[in-house]
Image (cartoon, helix red, strand yellow):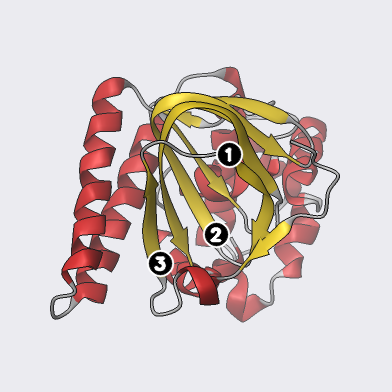
Amino acid sequence: MKRKLKPIVFSKETIFPNSDFCTIEEKDQPVVAFHKHNFGEIAFIISGSGIHVTEDDEYPLKRGDVFVIDGDCAHGFTKLKNLHIVNIVFCHDKFNALREEFKGLPGFNVLFDLEPALRKSHSFKSKLHLNPDQTKEIYSLLKLLRKEFNNKLPWTEMAAESIFKMIVIQICRDYCHLDTPKTDILFKIEKSLNFMKHNFVKPITLGRLAKEAEMTIPVYRRIFKEITGLPPINFLLSCELPKRQGCL
């Protein structure tokens, strides 16, 4: 697959025009051309294998892999072998509104923000990988979500949103059980982000943030900027006072 080609662009208006999110399941995924989209995506590899191609690199896929794809990041899938994949695609506006409910959920910032930001430097080694039992459990929830959409019964949107939240909570819990050096760094940064969130109206020093992350100030400053694009204090100040909690 040639990554230098201009990516195809998919839009929410053509994929799921009448809802805020939906599931797309392929039990034998064909090769997917290099593309991008104006919505977010959570990919669940149920079985099989393949290669995930991005603008920067290529990464192998296998059963149990779970990862978030920002719509602005062009990507595709190639060298597929019986790849069974389920995608939850979601409207950015709706998901950003739901972020308020997930504040403080351990693993949330890591899975949806930090891991995607460090995917290139971590060579995809920070991704969530489910064991066979966890994969079966999450697939059951995915089938329940798909069934709810297909039923089109009263209050379908409300019921589907509840199942979606259950899935998000479950994969965040699963992420918290990972124990690798790469993910350990992400969880330490998440601790400092949560500290910002809960103490944004108080004076916050760089030393205190580094302490929360269990790092020295120079190391914390370097890693934080690598992930967010801003030094820690600048990141904090970039959020207007009334909106700081929503920025973290």
Dots 3, 1 in contact, CB < 8 A = no
Q: CA distance from mark 3 to mark 1?
A: 23 Å
Please say if 159 is above or below 173. below
- Kindly indicate the quadrant of the structure image that contains residue 102: bottom left
Q: CA distance from mark 2 to mark 3?
A: 9 Å
User: Along the polypeptide, which appears first: circle 2 or circle 1?
Assistant: 1
- Quadrant containing the N terminus in the rendered view: top right
Query: Could you tell me the amino acid type at mark 3?
Result: Phe
Circle 3 crowding by C-alpha within 10 Å: few under 14, some 14–19, many from 20: many
What residue did someone put label 1 on? 31
- Quadrant containing the C terminus in the rendered view: bottom right
- Kindly indicate the quadrant of the structure image that contains residue 80: top right
- Provide residue 94's location: percent of width, then percent of height: 46, 73
Query: Could you tell me the amino acid type at mark 1?
Result: Val
Element type at marker 1? loop
Circle 1 crowding by C-alpha within 10 Å: few under 14, some 14–19, many from 20: some
Q: Is residue 36 left or right of residue 222?
A: left
- Provide residue 212's location: percent of width, then percent of height: 59, 39
